[in-house]
Image (tube, rainbow, N blue to C red):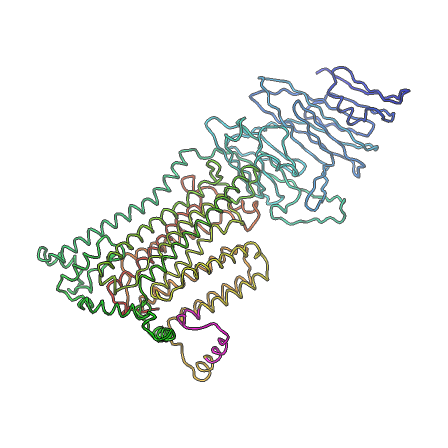
Amino acid sequence: MVLRSCWKSRHKTSSGHVHCWTRPGFAALLWLCLTHLGCGTGAVGETKKVVQKDAEFDVTYNETVTSDNQTIYAFNHTISRNKTEGVRVSVDVMSEGLESPILFVVRQKQAVLSFQVPLILRGLYQRKYPYAHVGRTLCQPPTRAASETQYFFVDVSTLSSLGTHYQLRVSRVDRFTLQTDKKFSFTASPSQPQYFKYVFPDGVDTVIVKVNSEMTFPCSVMSIQDILCPVYDLDNNVAFIGMYQTMTKKGAITVQRKDFPSNSFYVVVVVKTEDEACGGPLRFYPLRPDELIDAGNRSKVIDVVVSPAINSEVYVMGMLFCLGIFLSFYLLTFLVACLENKRMNKRREVLLNPADMSPAETASLLGKNGDGKTPASPYEYGSFADNGSTLSSEAVTDSATSTDNNYGYMERSLDSVGRSRQESLSSVEEDDYDTLADIDSDKNIVRTKKFLCVSDLARKDKRILSKKYQIYFWNIATIAVFYALPVIQLVITYQTVVNVTGNQDICYYNFLCAHPLGALSAFNNILSNLGYVMLGLLFLLIVLKRDIVHNRALVRNDLNALECGIPKHFGLFYAMGTALMMEGLLSACYHVCPNYTNFQFDTSFMYMIAGLCMLKLYQKRHPDINASAYTAYACLAAVIFFSVLGVVFGRGNTVFWIVFSVIHILATLLLSTQLYYMGRWRLDSGILRRMVYVIYTDCIRQCSGPMYIDRMVLLVMGNIVNWSLAAYGLIERPNDFASYLLAIAICNLLLYFAFYIIMKLRSGERIQCLPVVCILFTAVVWGFALFFFFQGLSTWQKTPAESREHNRDCILLLFFDDHDIWHFLSSIAMFGSFLVLLTMDDDLDTVQRDKIYVF
């Protein structure tokens, strides 16, 4: 390059105007002269010296600048189309207490970069942090030629009249282009951001950029930007373009080739001036608005690795795996139904034609005991009977009445059974009583007996109860539609905002295992919820089969269906299956963009499922007094309402926790009273007087134990558990209120289920093979599911940067992470739990209801 010099002279003419001129060929400097030197009409006559000098790379220039002089450093370098070299400008200001900062302007072929030194970066509350050492990487304009020499200029000027000493050094960045699967380490600070280029290799359409550091703080930002000038690499502008996320120790962004037309992108790393965005403390507070605060050493050593992401084959394998797992349950259910149908057909043939088979075969198929005795009924050993077996109720009835064996109650005449049934059903009709008070008196007599049987609490007309419990299904279906539609709309908006703004801090993904598909950022987390939907649908089909068979038995006046076993009401089962399907849909919606504002989407139907399961357990032996659908859903709505309040206002709010704990304890006491007295009590102005009277008569006047010991044991244990949970919440005040509320529901459900099983065995009843297998299988699956749930791959209780510290790589098929496996296992476990509730009392299908105890 030919050495050049540019000077500008000013003199005042007679007309008072100032003339300025430049040598030909330096029109590019004219703008600089007019802007920084005040050349133009009306300027006061003064002289400012402008010096341009050729400069070299990797040479440190120690100079002094004042308002009277300006220095222009001219650099040239050769760039090629096949090789990209970075150019970095580093500046140090040696003087302190500057009157005015030094302005550096870097002019390139297609870009202009300017910054002042000391560089002032602002934090929260307008705090100002000065940095005397600044390093910036120049944007590299693309070139079409195989090789081209490009020039750029560094202009140094100031308005300070005092001499300011500075050091300038321009150097090449040799490892400016990142290599695939090769770790690269560098150091960055707020005033010395770094960025590097990555070019997609052939055959790779998606890569994942992983940034790691051994240092938690200072907080930093990783950004992915297109190959355009300027590059936004300061704390105050890094969010202007591209994708970005804050990070402490870990950060990861999945980048797709289709989003970058140049098949390349910049990886930008910026260190923030403050750590508040990453959950760190605010150490400095401004004493005066314009006071400059020394930020100290905020350098951070960072490693970056760019690795190819999974290809389309892994996507297909993951989807087929997910479908295969849950379709296998459909196949298994079909096989079990076929085997059961075959076994029951053989049993029917034996009962109809016992002479055609040997005694040993007959005994085997009839299920005789080892002592040669025949069981009480042909369904005793595991048949689905009227609850959904492939054997029809008609065949069972025919076989039962055609044999000479004594089957207990079945020797009674159909007329006497029908007559007693009509008397039972009419016992609660209003026209059988003189006044409504007689009905209440009858209820008081029946429900306050010391030992209740199911027949005492199954006196209402079955048609009325069936309609009552069908409302559960229709209500939850209506709730699902009105709840799901705005949820879907909202999460689509969330995903759109993420894609448009590039702000990766909005959603709490496991970024190390977040596989995008289309507009979705984490398709694997959505796909893994398919199990809830498919298994919920399968459960509905099983319930539908049982419902159809049972209704056919009722039409034929089958004795088993009319007078035996736990009354069959399937409305709650339909509601449970629907709730399981909706849990899958809403969990998928939540995982479109998981964060604390929409976590209720993932938990609302979990509350529903827990509540419906408890209601179903209670309904089994209390069909006449179970809560109506309107009451149940109103209570569940109150739970969800408190869940929202807890998420929004509960974090560290002592007043909220006091109010909630009081409500929790009062609700526990009211429910305990309702269950203990079977609804035969009143909450009115005389409640306190009656409580004092009971305490005086039963505790002071004479010490008598509770009349219903079993119920009292359950309720005491329930109160201990709930009071303990309330105390824990009041003392610890956990940040994840929704999970805390869910834990309360699950603990109560498990307590009631354990009590039901224990009391069932204590009453001399037994559990058939199928429910036992379901219980054991479900318990094991729940154990593994909870193990993966507590791995905690992300948490919205912390900042996005802190949450990413928990991120982990995929562990299954390179596609699914720990939380996806939780989805798989928990959906299977819920399905198994539902089957337990469905089949647990099949052993009672041939037992009269006045022989089945209530507990």
- Quarter of the image for residue 407 reads bottom left
Residue sitting nearer the eye, 104 or 405: 405
Asked if residue 678 is among those painted magenta in the image, a careful observer would answer: yes
Residue drawn at (66%, 49%), measured in percent from left and top?
282
On-image quarter of the C terminus: bottom left
In the rendered image, the residue lying farthest to the right is 14
Residue drawn at (70%, 48%), measured in percent from left and top?
284
In the rendered image, the residue lying farthest to the bottom is 701
* Residue 207, placed above or below residue 841: above
In the rendered image, the residue lying farthest to the left is 355
**Is residue 294 shown left or right of residue 338?**
right
**Is residue 758 shown left or right of residue 401?**
right
* Residue 394, placed above or below residue 59: below
On-image quarter of the N terminus: top right
In percent of width and height, residue 780 lies at 36, 54
In this rendering, does residue 659 appear at all?
yes
Residue sitting nearer the eye, 28 or 78: 28
In this rendering, does residue 449 appear at all?
no
Q: Which residues are magenta?
A: 672-693
In percent of width and height, residue 487 lies at 49, 47
* Residue 518, placed above or below residue 415: above
In percent of width and height, residue 121 lies at 70, 40
